[in-house]
Amino acid sequence: IDLIPPPEITTPPPPRDTAAPHRVLAVLVDSLRFDVAMSADVMPNLARLREGALWGETTPCRDEVTTECLRAALGGTDRSSALTAVAGRTGAVDRSLIPFRLHARGMSTWMCSEAGEHLLEGAVEPCRAPPDRRGQPWNDAARVEAAIEAYAMGRHGLVLAHLVDADE
């Protein structure tokens, strides 16, 4: 049980032209089995990325609903149950999640996610972009490309790309 109350958000994020002193680019891959992710034969690009990156396996949430699992990944605790799944869908805001904590300390977060931006409303700058070059709606490749561009701009302490099509 987390007995420490989350901080109140009192500090606005830094101005857009201010470089973040410490930056992290995180790619959260939804629904990718660990054995598949670890196979260099199946996923050679991911294997190359792992060589120079900090990475880890997450334990799936009890209810395996993307919203609750994303909340657990960004908060460090799986609080999923029948009641929290319902609460998560009613718009309850969990200010203990990492982007809210960063925001409270004056750092901004950028996020591109088909399923999770609503959890972090007010704490993240969501990706807003037209369809990709082929006229298709957002897909995982477009999310990664946008995240790399957002990271390269240097304004955000945390850049998150949440990939949701790994199981398709």
Image (cartoon, helix red, strand yellow):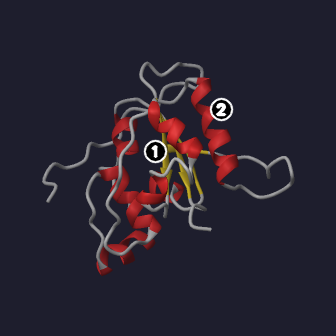
- x then y, percent, for residue 140: 64, 53
Quadrant (top left, top right, bottom left, bottom right) of the C terminus: bottom right
Tell me if I can see residue 146 in this picture: yes
In the displayed orientation, state which residue is furthest to the front: 41
Residue 80 vs 165, above or below: the answer is below
Contact check, label 2 and label 1, Cβ < 8 Å:
no
Distance CA(mark 2)–CA(mark 1): 19 Å
In primary-sequence order, the first of circles 2 and 1 is: 1
- Label 2 crowding class (10 Å Cα cut-off): few <14, some 14-19, many 20+? few
Tell which of 153 and 45 is nearer to you. Answer: 45
Q: Which residue is mark 1?
A: 123
Image quadrant where residue 34 sits = bottom left
Q: Amino acid at mark 1?
A: Ala
Q: Which residue is mark 2?
A: 149
Residue 150 vs residue 122: left or right?
right
**Going 31% across and 52% down the picture, which residue do you hit?**
75
Q: Nearer the viewer, residue 150 or 126?
A: 150
At x 50% / y 54%, what residue is drawn?
29
Residue 132 at what x, y percent from top left? Answer: 80, 49
27 left or right of 128 in image: left
Q: Which quadrant of the view contains residue 152?
A: top right
Query: Who's the residue at 51% across and 58% down the image?
Result: 116
Percent x, y for residue 114?
60, 59
> Please, what secondary structure does the residue beneath circle 2 have?
helix
Point 35% across, 65% down: residue: 60
Q: Amino acid at mark 2?
A: Glu
Name the outermost residue toward the bottom: 82
